[in-house]
Amino acid sequence: MFWNRRRKNPDLTLTEITSRLRGFILDSQINNAHEISVILGCAITSEEVAEKEEEESEKRVDAISYLFPLIYAHAHALSEGATSFQRQALPSLGEMPNIPEEVWIESRKLMEQVSVAALVGSISQLVDMGLLEVPKMRKKNGI
């Protein structure tokens, strides 16, 4: 991916910001994306518009799918490191009871899922805005 100097920055209107927010949430591939986007201030959309937005999101995410192994590796490393740091820092806090191993495993998994979602959503939106460019050898169907 390279900086794309040819495309101008989009106007930062409220419509553009909420559109990008909804796109980020959809691209993050989290459950209940449309409901969450409304909670965060985006307008409610019709089923037809929601379906069209989901199709566009699939195209954006597909355009960066070649990065998924790297994204998952980074998210895994980040979650492992953060969980290990938390485990080391907790004893110094004093009155914390022993936390079962299963809690640490689930915490790491959740952190990894959140990291993957944030990275996929962010990268796909940056590419869509023209701030990052997909190399020509990776482009599909004119995306």
Image (spheres, grey):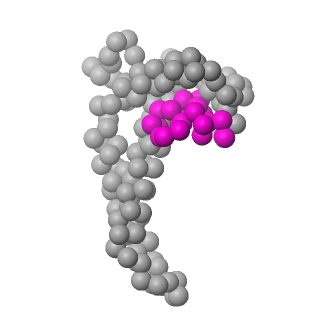
The residue under the point 45% across, 37% down is 29
Q: As rendered, which of 63 and 100 lies closer to the eye?
A: 100
Picture coordinates of residue 53, whole percent (x, y): 53, 22
- Is residue 43 visible in this depiction of the protein? yes
Q: In the rendered image, which quarter is residue 37 located in?
A: top right
- Is residue 12 visible in this depiction of the protein? no
The residue under the point 58% across, 21% down is 47
Q: Is residue 9 left or right of residue 121?
A: right
Q: As rendered, which of 21 and 127 lies closer to the eye?
A: 21
Q: In the rendered image, which quarter is residue 110 located in?
A: bottom left
From which residue to which does the magenta span run? 20-40
Picture coordinates of residue 97, whole percent (x, y): 46, 84
Toward the bottom, the furthest residue is: 94
> What is the count of numbered marks?
0
Dominant SS of magenta comes to: helix
14 in magenta: no
Toward the front, the furthest residue is: 47
Toward the right, the furthest residue is: 14
Picture coordinates of residue 140, whole percent (x, y): 32, 16
The residue under the point 33% across, 56% down is 77
Q: As rendered, which of 3 and 78 lies closer to the eye?
A: 78
Q: In the rendered image, which quarter is residue 35 located in?
A: top right
Picture coordinates of residue 65, whole percent (x, y): 33, 31
Looking at the rendered image, the quarter that the C terminus falls into is top left
Looking at the rendered image, the quarter that the N terminus falls into is top left
**Is 115 located above or below residue 85 in the figure?**
above
**Is 20 located above or below residue 30 in the figure?**
above
